[in-house]
Image (cartoon, rainbow, N blue to C red):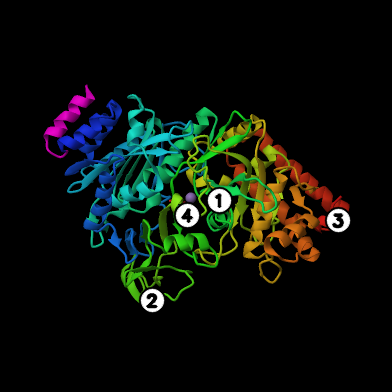
Amino acid sequence: MDSSKAFIEINKSDIISQEDYEKLYALNNEHVMRIVNEFIEVCRPSKVTVITDSKEDIQYVREKCIEIGEEARLSTKGHTVHFDGFFNIKNHDQARDKENTRVLVPEGEYTSPWINTIERKKGLEEIFDIMEGCMEGHECLVRFFCLGPKNSKFSILALQLTDSFYVAHSEDLLYRKGYEEFKKLNGSDNFFYFIHSSGELIGDPPITKNLDKRRVYVDLEENRVLSVNNQYAGNSLGLKKLALRLAIHKAENENWLAEHFFLLGVHPKDKERVTYFCGAYPSGCGKTSTAMLPNQTIVGDDIAYLRQWEDGYCHAVNIEGGVFGIIKDVNPEHDPVIYEAITTPKEVIFSNVLIYDGNPYWLGMGKKIPETGLNFSGEWFKGKNDENGIKITPAHPNARYTVRIEELENADPNFHNPDGVPLHAIFYGGRDSDTMPPILESLNWEHGVFLGASIESETTAQTLGKTGVRSVSTMANLDFIVIPLSKYLDNYKNFGNSLEHPPKVFATNYFLKDANGKFLNGMLDKMIWVMWAEGRSHGEFEAVNTPIGYLPKYEDLKRLFQLYLNKEYKQEDYEVQFSLRTEHLLEKLERIENLYSKEENMPEFFWKILKEERKKLIEMQAQYGKKIIKPSEIQ
Ligand code: SPV
Ligand code: MN
C-alpha cells in the first residue's frame, strides 16, 4: 500500500488542515506518514496539528496548554503549573508506574527476572485495544525532536504523537527541536517514535480518569513506545525514560552506552583545566547535588549517551536540553543555583506543588508553607486526609520543576558540542549507613563495572515501609535495562576495555553514620571527594590499595578540605570514615552474590572479582586480627 496516499484520504476527512498536512509532506518520509496515519486511525483524535520548530508553532502549544487547563499561569512571568492525576495516596499518577511498564518480548526469548515483560503479540493486542479511540475529542500533536546535539554522531531523532499539550510543552523545554533534522533523514526509518494519550480526562484541571488502564509498552522491535492513560512525565514523555529504554537496546548492538548519568564539568581551584565526570545514583543518593556542585558546570542531570572517540577517550553527550528535577528540598542553602533559576522570570513548569495566591510552594523550600491552596489533591488545607485517612502533604514529595539547562547560570559551554565531552571519570553513588567509605576508586575498569553493578541504596524514613532495607540497582539504571543484565554488564566491560583511556571509576557514599546514627560527613564534603577524584583522574594523588579499591590518603584530603571548605579535617575523622568494615563488606558481597545468581550467563569476570574480593577481605581479618581496619594501618 502506498502509505502517503492513504494519508491523503485522512486529510480529506478534515481532521488535518492543508497547511499541517504540508508540514508533514515536506519531510518526505513515508515512515512518518505511515505512523501518523496508523495511529490516527487507532486513536481517532478530532484534530491533528503538526508542530514544526517555528516560534509560532511552539507558542501555539504554550497557549493551548493554558486554554484547555493542562497548565495554569502563575504570578512570575513564564511560570506555569501542571497537575498529574490523583485520586488517593495509593491511586495516582505522580510517579513512574513500574508495574504497568512492560517490555514486549517475543515468545520464548530469555529476559532477566527483574525485567517486567509481556509476550509481544499479547501485549500489542492489549494496548491497541486500550488505545482504540483514546484520543476521541482531543487534538493530537505531532512533534519532532533530536535526542542529543544537532549534527552529532551521538544523536537519535524522535517522533512524538500526543494528545497532551503539557507533554508537548515539557518536551519543548527538555529536548532539542528536530523538525528540520527529520528532513535530513532522507526518508529513512532510523528514528524512535512514541505514541502517548492521557486517555479520557475528568475534572478541572483535567486528569486521566482510567488509571487502571494505564499502560506503557516498550516495543524494541519497532523502536517505539506506546503509552496511554497517564500524564506524569516519567510515564508520558516519550523522550525521557521511554527513549532511554529503546536506546539501551540500540546501544547494545552498536557498542556504545545509554546511561542514567549526570554530566558534570569539574573545575579545580588551583588548576587551569576542566575535567568531565558522569555519575549514576539511585534516587535519594545525592545525584542532583553532585551534578549541581557550586562553582562547577553542568552538562546534564539525567541521561547521557557514551561513545568511543578518536582521541582514545570515551565521549558523552546529554541527550536532553533541560532538567525535570525533584523540587523537594530545593532551597537557597542547599541548591542555590536551581533555587535562583526557578524563582525568577523564565519558562518554568512546576508540577504537583502547592499553589497559593499564584505562587508555588514545595516541601523543604526553606520558607513557610501556606495552610491552604490548590495541590495535587484539589483544594488542600492543613490536616487534609485522603479517603483512606492518609495525610496529604501540601506538595507531593515527587513534585517537580522543568527548566531549560541553558537558563541555569552553571550551564557548561560544551552543552551543545556535537563531539560531546571527554569523560575522565564515572561516579556511582550509593547510600548506606555502615559499609562503604565516602569515596573509593576502582582497581581497574572491570572492577569499576563491578562497583557500578553493586551500588546499593538504603530505604530512609522518607519512603514507605521499613528503614535501612538495602536494594541493588545496577548502575542506577535497573528500571530501564531492557536487555538481559548479563549482556548489559558484558557490553559495559567490553566498552571500557576497548578504550585507550577508559574513565576511572569511583564509588561514593555520602551517608555513613556513627554508632549513634549521626552522619559522619557534612553536606558539602562531597566537593572534596569530587576534587580528589579529579586529581586521581590526572594521576595526581597517591592512594591506599585495599581489596575494595583505592582509598584517599589523609594528607591529600586535609589539603583539599582546607582549599575548598576552609575546614580543618581531623585525622581521627579520616580514620573512622575510611576504615574497612570488613564484616559489613562481606555481607554486602553476599547480597550481591544472591541477587546476581538469579541471572543466567553472568560474565565470568564478575564472579572472579567478587570471589577475589571476598578472599582478600577474609585474609585481612586474619592478618590484622580484627574486623575494622583503619586506613593508616593498611600496608
Ligand atoms: C527518575 O525517576 O529517575 C527521574 C524522573 O529522572 S522520571 O522522569 O520519572 O524518570
Ligand atoms: Mn532519572
Closer to the camera: disc 2 or disc 3? 2
Q: Range of the magenta residues?
A: 1-16
Gap in Å between the C-alphas at discs 3 and 4? Answer: 45 Å
Vertical relation: 388 (above or below) 475: below
Query: 514 and 625: which one is in front?
Result: 514
Which of 394/581 is in front? Answer: 394
**Disc 2 marks which amino acid?**
Pro
Disc 3 under 8 Å from ligand 1? The reply is no
- Mark nearest the camera among 1 and 2 is 1
Residue 7 part of the magenta-drawn span: yes
- How many residues crowd mark 4 within 10 Å: few (<14), some (14–19), many (20+)? some
Between the residue at mark 1 and the residue at mark 4, the CA separation in whole angstroms equals 10 Å
Tell whether 361 sits left or right of 465.
left
Of callouts 3 and 4, the N-terminal one: 4
Q: Quadrant of the N terminus?
A: top left
Q: Work out whether residue 104 or residue 547 is closer to the camera in this orientation and state it.
A: 547
Q: Quadrant of residue 346?
A: bottom left
Q: x and y percent of residue 453 in the render? A: 61, 44
Type of residue at label 1?
Thr
User: What amino acid does circle 3 point to?
Assistant: Glu
Whether ligand 1 has any atom under 8 Å from the Cβ at mark 2 is answered as no
How many numbered discs sit on the rendered protein?
A: 4
Residue under pointer 4:
408
User: From the viewer's perspective, is residue 585 above or below residue 108?
Assistant: below
User: What is the CA distance from the residue labelled 1 to the residue labelled 2?
Assistant: 34 Å
Q: Secondary structure at mark 3?
A: helix
> What type is the residue that disc 4 sits on?
Leu
Residue 370 is tagged as 2
Q: Looking at this rendering, what residue extends furthest in the top direction?
A: 1
